[in-house]
Image (cartoon, rainbow, N blue to C red):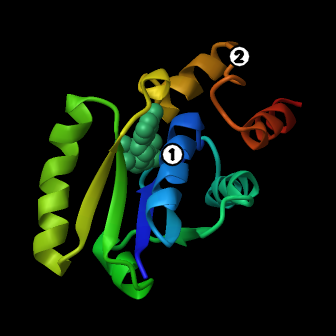
Amino acid sequence: MRRAVCPGSFDPIHNGHLEVIARAASLFDEVIVAVSTNYAKKYRFSLEERLEIASETLTSLRGVSVRPMGEGLLVQFCREHGANLIVKGLRSSADFEYELPMAAMNRQLAGVETVFIPAEASYSHLSSTLLKEVSALGGDISPFVPKAVMKRLRTSAE
Ligand code: ADP
């Protein structure tokens, strides 16, 4: 049984994330989407909202589940959930430079491997930060995010 963890803050989840999660689901038996929270960080969406959005959006993907991840080590979360693989999407060499030391550390700490999935070219410019900026300035981000995100944005604007 190959169980992988896809971690992120997913504030909010977007089509680039969804594509990587779907590809991970086709490679592994089970994929746990781990929604992180750092209490020092300010999020646009609460943890509950980020969990709900991810769950609503991913409900039809077989083998994929969504779980909250506390502030502890990612390898500890992996251990607690019986996973020995981490999946990360790579958009650019900057992502790679950032991810490489973490991947080495996670392997040395706990023998957990990291698998990198190259971002689909049409999504490689997407980041949650950029989408939040565009949306806050009145841009339409509906082509880039699932419906569940647009629904939350509309209700919070009312
Ligand atoms: P962070 O944890 O830095 O807030 P995110 O939650 O946005 O980052 O992303 C979680 C994971 O999704 C990371 O592995 C990141 O590289 C990957 N990712 C983010 N955006 C994309 C994208 N457009 N295409 C593929 N992978 C992506």
Residue at 61%, 59% in the rendered image: 47
x, y percent for residue 32: 51, 68
Mark closer to the observer (1, 2): 2
* Circle 2: element type: loop
User: Which residue is nearer to you in this view: 84 or 45?
Assistant: 84
For label 1, the crowd category at 10 Å Cα-Cα, with few meaning under 14, some 14 to 19 and many 20 or more, is few
The image quadrant that residue 48 belongs to is: bottom right
x, y percent for residue 31: 50, 67
Residue 89 bears which disc, if any?
A: none
Residue at 42%, 66% in the rendered image: 5
- Extreme residue toward the right, this view: 158
Relative to 66, is 98 on the left or the right?
A: left
Establish if 99 lies above or below 85.
above
- According to the picture, the residue beneath numbered tag 2 turns out to be 140
> Where is the N terminus found, in terms of image quarters?
bottom left
Question: Any atom of ligand 1 within 8 Å of the CB at mark 2?
Answer: no
x, y percent for residue 56: 76, 56
